[in-house]
Image: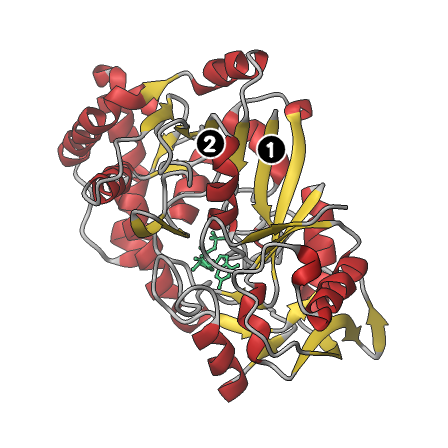
Amino acid sequence: MVQAVVGANWGDEGKGKITDMLAENADIIVRFQGGANAGHTIVNNYGKFALHTLPSGVFYDHTTSIIGNGVALNIPVLFNEIKSITDKNVPMPKILVSDRAQMVMPYHILFDQYEEERLAGKSFGSTKSGIAPFYSDKYAKIGFQVSELFDEEALREKIERVIVQKNILLEHLYHKPLIDADETFNTLMEYKKMVEPYVCDVSAFLWDAIKEGKNILLEGQLGSLKDPDHGIYPMVTSSSTLAAYGAIGAGIPPYEIKKIVTVVKAYSSAVGAGAFVSEIFGDEADELRKRGGDGGEYGATTGRPRRMGWFDCVATKYGCRIQGTTDVAFTVLDVLGYLDEIPVCVGYEIDGEVTTDFPTTSKLEKAKPVLKTLPGWKEDIRGIKEYDKLPENCRKYIEFIEEQIGFPITMVSNGPKREDIIIRKK
Ligand code: GDP
């Protein structure tokens, strides 16, 4: 069976933890989109890890970890990540990389930085991992697939062709040093050595695995609201964050995705620019940021403080719908135990009218939150294993949100560890 684990919001919902937990019963875990621009944080017996490229299944020895064709593959990052986990005594994971995955080129990272510099105050808040230039090139058909590393003559010729236009931009738009074809070729030959042992025809591998009845997890990065089509365009990422894209980014039939576990955090956080209707500021935000996640809400890749907000029912209802949610995993609920009262955003007021439908970006920018305040439970809920043992106000909070978003909350996460999970019998 194929299941997807995806986010309903702006990312950082705790997908890494949920994937790591579900990976116990999985044979294969596949990354199908995104690159090293975001990270998952996983806490387990080996320690605490921030993964940017490897799927969250690498800590189990019974799983195969796959980088699908939809990923922006940064080969040096992948290899440093493998090293960083094996250095901490995690057994060498089984890793496969799609021969159709495209590579983040050194100049993609530079172009990302140069463009942010050029835009200055009007920038998108990119993590400068080269993701936007990478996907631009992919769809402009001047990207480089892993498979191209194995035809050196054709590769050399293509590099020369592609860097002509890159160098025009470098010289005239950015006024930066030009790219050298030989140097680029040599770098790619280094990449080839690093990636060669893992390269395979991933979609053929998964086709066989599906036929054999294997359990496959598709691991999404970021969340619905960062999807380039359905998110808060243009403050989005450059590859689709939706479960549906899992079929393309892994190379499997869409009808095989039977379960879509959408991860939803008990409050909101976001990184980068863009409208964030339920955002809070000042001491209120600082307190939640400090207590949030596991050790505070700071970016896994950049370390920058995340923007904080109350739970947003409008954005989450939409985010779950657009994912095609079958199950909601509701995470980081333990963090809210300090609050006497918990505001929740239940509607958006736009031009004097209240709506619960998530609007397009220009209207979103005008939206003001309609808040409803629920009573807190003022208790530490970590360690609780059964739903009925949760404090009454805590259950009421969950059930209120479930009703507002209209999708079943079947898992409640009350701590960062694998075992901090309450499976709700429905
Ligand atoms: P992802 O990108 O969606 O995997 O999210 P991140 O890993 O960036 O952010 C989730 C953070 O919350 C990490 O630091 C996790 O260890 C932590 N976390 C996940 N689930 C829980 C939970 O239920 N409670 C607490 N306190 N922390 C959690």
Q: In the depicted view, which residue is nearer to us: 172 or 387?
A: 387
Residue 183 in percent (x, y) is at: 14, 35
* 13 horizontally vs 104: left or right: right
Label pair 2/1, CB-CB below 8 angstroms: no
Disc number placed over residue 29 in the picture, else none: 2
Q: In the depicted view, which residue is nearer to us: 178 or 350?
A: 350
Q: What's under tag 2, amino acid-wise?
A: Ile
Quick check: can you spot residue 169? Answer: no
Compared to residue 393, the image places residue 94 above or below, namely above
Residue 87 in percent (x, y) is at: 18, 43
- Find disc 1 in the rendering and name its residue: 3
Quick check: can you spot residue 379? Answer: yes
Residue at 58% x, 80% y: name it. Answer: 280
Residue 123 in percent (x, y) is at: 44, 65
Count of number-bearing discs: 2
Q: Secondary structure at mark 1?
A: strand
Q: Secondary structure at mark 2?
A: strand
